[in-house]
Structure formats: C-alpha cells, structure tokens
C-alpha cells in the first residue's frame, strides 16, 4: 500500500451538528486499499459520528465522502451497503429471535423456486464464514442468548458476507479474549492483503500498534493529526487525544487488606461452573481472569443473585445471602456493574437522570412520588464526578456515546455507596483518559474499605489493578496468583490449562 495512490475512501472536511452541539467539525481522512487505518480519540471526540456518516445513518451538514474518487450521497444504511461500505458497530445489532444464519445473510437469503428461502444453503454460507473466522457457532441456533463475544463474531461474519471494499470496525475486540483478538486480526490482515480498506477504532493501543499502518487522532470533534504508525509512540498518541500527558493509566494504591467482606464457598451451577470458592477483603481489588467463556461473568451474576445457583453459599460481612435475590444483595451493600451495559445496565429510552438514579428511587421518593428535581440533583453529582458528557440530563441515555453510557451505569451503582463492588468489564469501550479515572475511582474506593471484585479481559488492566488474580478455566477456578507474582505468562498459562492448579 502506498499513500501516494488515490484513496479508496476519502472524507473531506465533513461537519455534523446536533442542535447547538457540533459533534464533528471539518474532519478529513483517507482510507487506502490494502491499509488498516486507526481512528482514535476520547469518548465524545466524534469517532462514532464519523462512523455513522460512513454508514449512512447521519448525513454530513457540509463536506463530502468519496469512494474511488466518486462523490457519494449516503442517504441511508442501504446506500452505504450498496456502495461497498460495511460497518461493525461497537454494540452488536442482531435480531435476537432470528437464527445466526438469518442474521448473517439478512436481506440476501438464497432462494429456491417460488422465492422460498433455501435454509440448507443459507446455513452453509454462514458456516463458511465462521470457518474462515476459525470459530464454531451453530448457524441454525437463535441469536438470543449468544455471549457478547459470539454476537460480535456474527457481526463480523455479516460484514464479510457483504464482500465490502471498505470495512469499518468500531471496537470489534472489546469483549474478545486475546486468542479471539489474534484470530480476528488474522482475518483483518487477510482482508487488507486482499485489497480492502479498513478503518479500525479501538482504545487498546497494543491492538493499534499491532494491526494498523496509519493513525488519525480526533479531539473535541476536530482533526488533530494523521500519521504513519511508525512515527508515533503510545505516549504521543495519548497526548494528542487528551491534550495533556497522561501520568499513569493504573493509579493503584497500596492498601492493607481488612476483614473478609465477600466470601464465596463451593458455588456451582450445572453445566456452567462448579466448586468456585474465594474471598475478597476490605481494601482489596481481586480480579477474575480467564478466556471468554470460562464462566467469570456467570459466577459474579450468581453471586449477586441475577442468575440462579445450584450449590454453594455467598456471605457478605458474615451474613449469608439468599440465592437468586438481587434485592437482598443490594440491601447487604453489594453493587454489580454488568458486562453488557445496553441489555443489562440501562433503559435506553429513559433519561440520563432516570438511569443514573434507578438504584436510589426509594430514597429519593417523597410519599411514594419520585420528584424530577430530586432525581436530577442526585444524578448530577456522580455524572459530574465521572465527567459524563451529555447535552441534558433529561435526554434519552441512548443518545450518549458508548463510553458515556458506561459512565452512567457506574454512576448508578457508585451512588449507592456499596461495601462490595462487582465490576464486569468496567472499562470496555471507554477511552484512555476515562479508563484512568475509572481505575482511580476503584483504587480510591478500595482505600476507603470497599471490597472490589473485577472481571476483565484486558490483561494490562488485571495486572495493573489487582491485588490478587483468580484465574478461571472451563467453569472452574484453577489458579490464585498474588500481585507480586502475576504477569501475562502466568495468567495465560493458567487460563489455557498450562499452569499449576490452585
């Protein structure tokens, strides 16, 4: 690939405003055939708006989008698909009641006579894409119930089925394990080598340096720079994104461990996990690590009572919690920030204020009535502390960027002043500056005596924040590694079955 060649896709001085808010201001970038081009910036920098303009969801107020030198008018997603632009969004957009294969070839199903859908051919097409991706997903199973990782794989297969010349990947690896990320990268490189132009959006700098050839940086809706990857260091990328140097991403404080606040004994759920036992003490941050599918999220959901458990005991502060009773967990001072914020953490059409205060409605109500003023005042405190960007607290939370939606979920639970905080992928889809703030909050909470249990697929986050690392594999707890002995090799050896058992 040579940047002296004409670009496959050119974005020329595009501007997009929503009311008085200018989301993107005269942004330009070029995507070349045979190139993976990174687009980076903080949440709210304008990345998602650029992606939605390429997808035909939004039309620019000014500026042009050109494909192979020809100006495009993208007046809807169908026009973008017809032009050869495929977008893999940060959040999966599957039809849950259709099969996996129907989602992959939606609108392009093979037909028999009388225009009947040829299901065997459709399933074979989808199976071929999954084979290319190196995954085993049954094309005939319903999409409902798929993990986030599998939903993302289906989205990728959908994009591959379009045979697109331009592929936009918006945080495609956010919920994937390291093995799955490398498998995706192998597919991305094959697409690149086949002449496709890829736009890759990620907050993980190790992914950008491993995959991309050029990096474009946005800040506050405006273009900062666009340079070859070899001309940039990670520190320089961070400085351009946030407008200042970032001292440290993992501000972990050394805190003496106190009394046991969370004790889990022989927890089990048939076919999912078994014989899981651990403790988390006041002032500790304990990480549950392992590959996607190891059972980490299922364990913390059972601890909180969202999912049932068949065996085992959960105690908070020495008192046993009833199984399958989230209200009892909340009353005991347990908070759960879930992995899937859109499905499990938010009511998307409700306001920012309503979402940020759902855990406190009883305390905010007067004579059984929830007053809007009290709701907004309560919401404003934690959304301000987390530096959440929104136009108005009464706006639907669906209008916020993915990272700002995650901040609202965090605000909802942190406002309850929990004794035990369970966070499942707390920084998924969050920019580097906000990651540092979330990590600082976790460290501060631990210093105040909160017991923190964290599930994370990002090894740097696990190693940077955890006092102890608990590694799960195939539904079992297989290793416990103290902070001073934890490194990437020891965690991955245990997660893949190569390390010593706990």
Image (tube, rainbow, N blue to C red):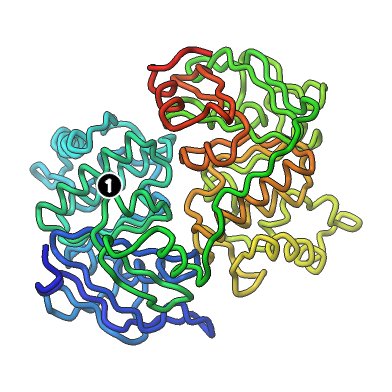
Quadrant in the rendering for residue 392? bottom right
Query: Residue 75, percent across and down?
Result: 28, 75
* Residue in the picture at 67% in, 51% down: 441
Q: Which residue is mark 1?
A: 156
Query: Residue 96, percent across and down?
Result: 40, 42
Q: Nearer the viewer, residue 194 or 347?
A: 194
Q: How many labels were placed on the picture?
A: 1
* Residue in the picture at 34% in, 74% down: 225
State left or right for residue 261 relative to residue 466.
right
Quadrant in which the N terminus is drawn? bottom left
* Residue in the picture at 38% in, 77% down: 223
* Residue in the picture at 59% in, 17% down: 276
Query: Residue 292, percent across and down?
Result: 42, 32
Q: Nearer the viewer, residue 162 or 247?
A: 247
State left or right for residue 200 relative to residue 414.
left
Quadrant in the rendering for residue 83? bottom left
287 w.r.t. 11: above or below: above
229 w.r.t. 443: above or below: below
SS state under label 1: helix
Q: Nearer the viewer, residue 369 or 114?
A: 369
State left or right for residue 324 relative to residue 56.
right
């Amino acid at each position: 690939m040579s940047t002296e060649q004409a670009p496959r896709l050119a974005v020329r001085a595009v501007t997009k405003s929503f009311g008085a808010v200018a989301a993107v201001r005269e942004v330009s970038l070029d995507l070349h055939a045979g190139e993976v081009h990174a687009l980076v910036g903080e949440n709210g920098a304008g990345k998602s708006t650029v992606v939605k303009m390429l997808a035909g969801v939004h039309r620019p107020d000014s500026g042009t989008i050109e494909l192979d030198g020809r100006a495009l008018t993208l007046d809807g997603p169908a026009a973008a698909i017809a032009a050869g632009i495929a977008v893999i969004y940060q959040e999966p957009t599957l039809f849950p009641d259709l099969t996996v294969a129907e989602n992959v070839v939606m609108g392009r199903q093979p037909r028999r006579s009388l225009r009947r859908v040829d299901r065997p051919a459709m399933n074979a097409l989808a199976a071929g894409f999954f084979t290319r991706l190196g995954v085993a997903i049954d094309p005939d199973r319903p999409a409902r119930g798929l993990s986030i990782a599998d939903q993302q794989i289906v989205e990728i297969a959908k994009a591959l089925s379009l045979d697109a010349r331009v592929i936009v990947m918006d945080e495609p690896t956010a919920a994937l394990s390291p093995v799955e990320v490398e498998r995706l990268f192998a597919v991305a490189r094959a697409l690149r080598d086949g002449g496709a132009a890829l736009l890759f959006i990620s907050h993980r700098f190790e992914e950008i340096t491993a995959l991309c050839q050029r990096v474009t940086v946005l800040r506050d809706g405006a273009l900062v720079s666009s340079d070859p990857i070899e001309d940039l260091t990670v520190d320089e990328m961070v400085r351009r994104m946030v407008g200042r140097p970032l001292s440290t991403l993992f501000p972990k404080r050394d805190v003496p461990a106190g009394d046991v606040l969370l004790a889990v004994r022989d927890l089990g759920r048939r076919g999912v996990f078994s014989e899981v036992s651990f403790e988390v003490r006041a002032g500790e941050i304990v990480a549950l690590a392992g590959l996607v599918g190891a059972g980490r999220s299922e364990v913390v959901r059972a601890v909180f009572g969202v999912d049932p458990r068949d065996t085992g005991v959960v105690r908070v502060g020495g008192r046993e919690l009833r199984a399958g009773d989230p209200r009892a967990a909340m009353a005991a001072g347990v908070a759960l920030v879930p992995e899937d914020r859109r499905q499990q953490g938010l009511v998307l059409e409700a306001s920012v204020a309503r979402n940020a205060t759902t855990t406190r409605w009883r305390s905010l109500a007067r004579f059984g009535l929830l007053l809007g003023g009290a709701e907004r005042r309560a919401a404003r405190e934690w959304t301000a502390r987390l530096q959440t960007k929104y136009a108005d607290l009464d706006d639907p939370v669906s209008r916020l960027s993915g990272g700002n939606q995650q901040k609202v979920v965090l605000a909802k639970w942190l406002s309850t002043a929990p004794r035990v905080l369970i966070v499942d992928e707390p920084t998924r889809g969050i920019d580097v500056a906000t990651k540092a703030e979330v990590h600082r909050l976790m460290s501060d909470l631990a210093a105040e005596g909160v017991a923190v249990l964290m599930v994370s697929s990002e090894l740097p986050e696990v190693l940077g924040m955890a006092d102890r690392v608990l590694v799960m594999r195939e539904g079992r707890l297989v290793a416990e590694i103290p902070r001073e002995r934890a490194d990437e090799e020891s965690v991955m050896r245990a997660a893949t079955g190569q390390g010593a058992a706990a």
